[in-house]
Image (cartoon, rainbow, N blue to C red):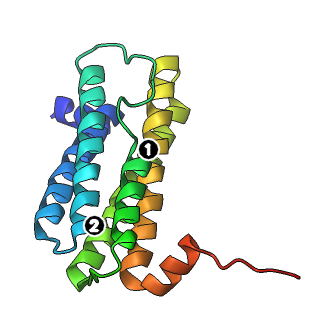
Amino acid sequence: MGKRKAEETNPVVMAIQMEKDGIAFYTKASRKTQNPFGKQMFLSLVEDEKNHLKLLDEILAGQKPAKPKAPAGPGFRTRVSSIFREVTGNVKKKLESNPSDVEAVKIAMEMEDRGFKHYDRHAKQTTDPAEKALFARLAKEEGDHWAILEDTHLYLTDPTTWHYRQNPPLLDGG
């Protein structure tokens, strides 16, 4: 029982479980959504969460986390922004959202918020500089995920406002 309690309070073990839960949820959401943008966004989240899981598994295995470096490919924000451009560039194809897509985005926002808070708290508490940098990076990435999900929620629930924010009108004072 002592080992189980220690595992439940170990921030790395907790983070690993959060990432596994995220992978499972985002995989399921990508299969269920009918919205092509939503499908690509959830698959992109799966990719990021798998990368987080790999880093956390290394820490749990007793390996010192490497100094965080920029991800090899384009980051989540870049990947999703390009998906948004593809979607808005194709005006002929109207994308309808359904309540389950909107609910999936809300749940995803809650998951990313919990992840951000967990990583941010651990980054502030740890004294190991490499771990501090890693958890700060993971907190930032979870924050980026949340911001994109918030943007997606607006896109699905109020496309007119979303489009207005993406393409603000030019005001000429002359």
Near-viewer residue (79 or 19): 79
Q: Position of residue 28 (x, y in %)?
A: 12, 61
Residue 135, given in percent of the width and then of the height, sits at: 45, 33
**Would you say residue 128 is visible in this rendering?**
no
Tell me whether circle 2 and circle 1 mark residues in contact (CB < 8 Å): no
Q: Residue at x 34, y 69 (%)?
A: 87
Number of the front mark, 2 or 1:
2
Q: Tell me where residue 116 appears, x and y as whole percent.
A: 44, 49
Residue for badge 2: 37
From the viewer's perspective, is 134 left or right of 156? right
Tell me if residue 62 can be seen: yes
Tag 2: amino acid = Phe
Say which residue label 1 marks: 141
Query: What residue is shown at x 41% (from left), y 76% (from top)?
Result: 155
Quadrant location of the C terminus? bottom right
Name of the residue lying farthest toward the top? 63
Residue 108 lies in quadrant: bottom left
